[in-house]
Image (cartoon, helix red, strand yellow):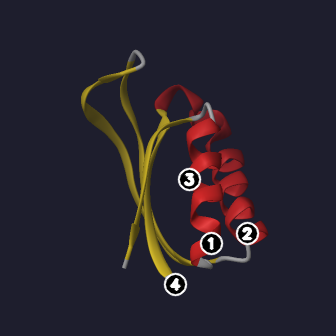
Amino acid sequence: MKYEIAFIIKSQLESTLDDTLVKIETEITTLMGEVTEKATWGKKRLAYPIEKNVDGFYYIWEFTIPSSKVGLLRKFMESNKDIVRSMITKL
C-alpha cells in the first residue's frame, strides 16, 4: 500500500538531523517498505508550542509498506524523542 508520512523534528537537533532521517528511512525499509518521494519543507514555526518546542524541521515522505506494518511504524515514530509530531495517511 502507498502511504504518506508528515513529521516534524525538533529544531535544536539541527546538527544530528541527518542521523534522525536515516533512522526513520531505515525503520521503513526494515518493515519491508520503500521511500518513493521525499519533500523537505525546512524549518518552520509551529502553530502552538509542543513540549516547549516552538519550531521544527518539516518533512513529508511518500512510501510503500505492507498495511500490517503501519502500526509498528507509528509506534516507532511516537517513541522517537527527536520527533515532535508525525502523521501517517493512506494515499
- Picture layout, residue 2 above or below residue 56: below
Residue at position x 28%, y 33% in the image: 46
Relative side of 30 to 89, left or right = right
Q: Identify the secondary structure beneath mark 3.
A: helix
Task: Tell me whether the residue at label 4 lies in contact with that at label 1, contact meaning CB atoms closer than 8 angstroms.
Answer: no
Residue kind at label 1, given as amino acid type: Ser
Structural distance between the alpha carbons of marks 4 and 3: 15 Å
Q: Earlier in the sequence, mark 2 or mark 1?
A: 2
Q: Earlier in the sequence, mark 4 or mark 2?
A: 4
Q: Earlier in the sequence, mark 3 or mark 2?
A: 2
Structural distance between the alpha carbons of marks 2 and 1: 9 Å
The x and y percentages for residue 4 are 43, 69
Report the disc number at residue 1: 4
Structural distance between the alpha carbons of marks 3 and 2: 11 Å
> Quarter-wise, where is residue 64 in the image?
bottom right
Q: Nearer the viewer, mark 3 or mark 1?
A: 1
Which residue is the extreme one toward the right?
30
Residue at position x 67%, y 76% in the image: 33
Residue kind at label 3, given as amino acid type: Arg
Residue kind at label 4, given as amino acid type: Met
Q: Earlier in the sequence, mark 3 or mark 1?
A: 1
